[in-house]
Image (cartoon, rainbow, N blue to C red):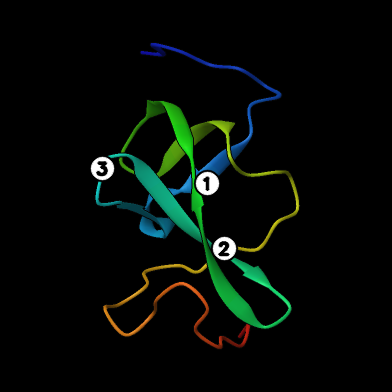
């Protein structure tokens, strides 16, 4: 059963999402080798992906499953 679909929806893996201090969604975007916290507005969400309404652009790289060591400005390296 399909409850919702949108062929052109921008989506992000839920493993990249976390809650900020204000309770809103955040994701770490990789910029120039550093993790940068970005506020993200999420629409529909399931157990794999969140629909991105604002805060991320197509093609941006995000940190998957960031642990507590990753903070805004941390050096990161894609693998």
- In the displayed structure, 39 sits above or below 61; it is above
Residue 32 in the figure: left or right of residue 52? right
Indicate the secondary structure of the residue bearing disc 3. loop
Query: Label for residue 62?
Result: 2
Q: Nearer the viewer, mark 2 or mark 3?
A: 3
Tell me how far mark 2 sits from mark 3, CA to CA. 21 Å
Query: What residue is rendered at 56% in x and 39% in y?
Result: 11
- In the displayed structure, 17 sits above or below 8; it is below
Give the residue pinned by disc 3.
22
Tell me which numbered mark, 1 or 3, is placed earlier along the sequence. 1
**Image position, residue 29 (x, y; %):** 58, 63
Q: Are marks 2 and 3 in contact (CB under 8 Å)?
A: no
**Image position, residue 50 (x, y; %):** 44, 37
**Image position, residue 40 (x, y; %):** 48, 40
Query: What residue is rendered at 73% in x and 78% in y?
Result: 32
Q: Are marks 1 and 2 in contact (CB under 8 Å)?
A: yes
Query: What residue is rendered at 58% in x and 32% in y?
Result: 54
Residue 3 in the figure: left or right of residue 22? right
Q: Nearer the viewer, residue 74 or 57?
A: 74
- In the displayed structure, 22 sits above or below 44; it is below
Query: What residue is rendered at 36% in x and 13% in y?
Result: 1
Query: Label for residue 12?
Result: 1
Tell me which numbered mark, 2 or 3, is placed earlier along the sequence. 3
Indicate the secondary structure of the residue bearing disc 2. loop
Quarter-wise, where is residue 31 in the image? bottom right
């Amino acid at each position: 059963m399909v409850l919702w679909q949108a062929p052109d929806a921008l989506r992000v893996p839920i493993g990249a999402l976390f809650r900020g201090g204000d309770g809103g969604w955040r994701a770490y975007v990789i910029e120039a080798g550093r993790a940068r916290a970005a506020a993200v507005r999420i629409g529909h969400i399931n157990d794999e992906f969140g629909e991105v309404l604002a805060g991320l652009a197509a093609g941006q790289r995000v940190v998957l499953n960031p642990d507590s060591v990753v903070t805004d400005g941390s050096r990161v390296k894609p693998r």
